[in-house]
Amino acid sequence: MARRRRGQRTPLTSVAIHATLLVATFIAVFPIAWIALASFKPREEIGSLSPIASPTLENYSRLLGETDFLRWFGNSVIVAVLTMAIGVFMSATAGYAISRFNFPGKRPLMWTFLITQMFPVAILIVPIYAIMSTLGLINTAASLVIAYCTVAVPFCTWMLKGYFDTIPRELDEAATVDGLGPFGTFWHVILPLARPGLAVTMFYTFLTAWGEVAYASAFLNTNDKFTLAYGLQTFVPQAPALPLWELMTPAAVLITIPAGFVFFFAQRHLVAGLTSGATKG
């Protein structure tokens, strides 16, 4: 009987592993596939698992023509893009400063960033709402951008700080010799090398703002200011009425498009950024 080499799997083990992977893939893909296919079904057929008998775009035309979906979509894009731009800028500058410089209060600042991640959104909504009300920002996109940055910036700062730690300090010294100041070194030398880490933080901050609903439901109170995540709640009427699946399914498909674009452009750097930021810091 031939001896099995070390690390070689038996046929039974291979079958079990592949079967597990197939089951996991089915569990992950089935809901997405069901929603995508259901969006092309007539209203009376959406609840069934049968194949599409007569595909139709009526659900999409109703969603885009009879609801405020496009307005909500535009509001979400504005909030998500602003959150991503401001959040990445603040995280990158703070992460670089913490990584490279020693200053009074550095350690308490790092602990503050970490501790803020321990509080659930339900606790933070009330004090942040009070601040936004005092500033007169209720029912504005600015209130959401500020709130989302309070969630994203501390986490992204820690991640980028860990990534900046992997970049040799000798590069900073060489840039100083060439006449660059701290900001010039950061902008021209460090940021180009930190693109994988920046891609991760861009993706994270965008998704934080794109799918969030708790702050949106607390800060927004008029239909024209709703974001997608909050606006889609209007498609779920009070019981005993059934959800408007003929509107929710095409909306779910269209919502994934912007996130898919961001992931497509960031995917080359995502793995490198996650692993590098997690190994040091």
Image (cartoon, rainbow, N blue to C red):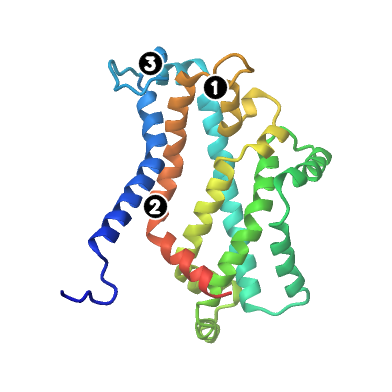
Sequence order check, earlier mark of 2 and 1: 1
Q: Is residue 92 above or below residue 68?
A: below
Q: Position of residue 145 (x, y in %)?
A: 65, 45
Q: Residues within 10 Å of mark 3 (few under 14, many from 20)?
A: some
Sequence order check, earlier mark of 1 and 3: 3
Q: Residue at x 23, y 61 (%)?
A: 11
Which part of the image, by quadrant, shows the C terminus?
Answer: bottom right
Residue pointed to by mark 2: 265
Q: Nearer the viewer, mark 1 or mark 3?
A: 3
Which part of the image, by quadrant, shows the N terminus?
Answer: bottom left
Inter-mark Cα distance, 3 to 2: 36 Å
Which residue type carries mark 3? Glu
Q: Secondary structure at mark 2?
A: helix
| Quarter residue 31 falls in | top left
Checking the image for residue 68, the label placed there is 1
Depth check: 60 or 103 in front? 60
Q: Is residue 16 above or below residue 260?
A: below
Q: Position of residue 211 (x, y in %)?
A: 56, 40
Residue pointed to by mark 3: 45
Q: Residue at x 42, y 20 (%)?
A: 47
Q: Residues within 10 Å of mark 1 (few under 14, many from 20)?
A: some
With 227 as the anchor, is 102 left or right in this view? right
Which residue type carries mark 1? Asp
Q: Position of residue 189 (x, y in %)?
A: 49, 74
| Quarter residue 101 falls in | bottom right
Depth check: 138 or 243 in front? 243
Sequence order check, earlier mark of 3 and 2: 3
| Quarter residue 100 falls in | bottom right
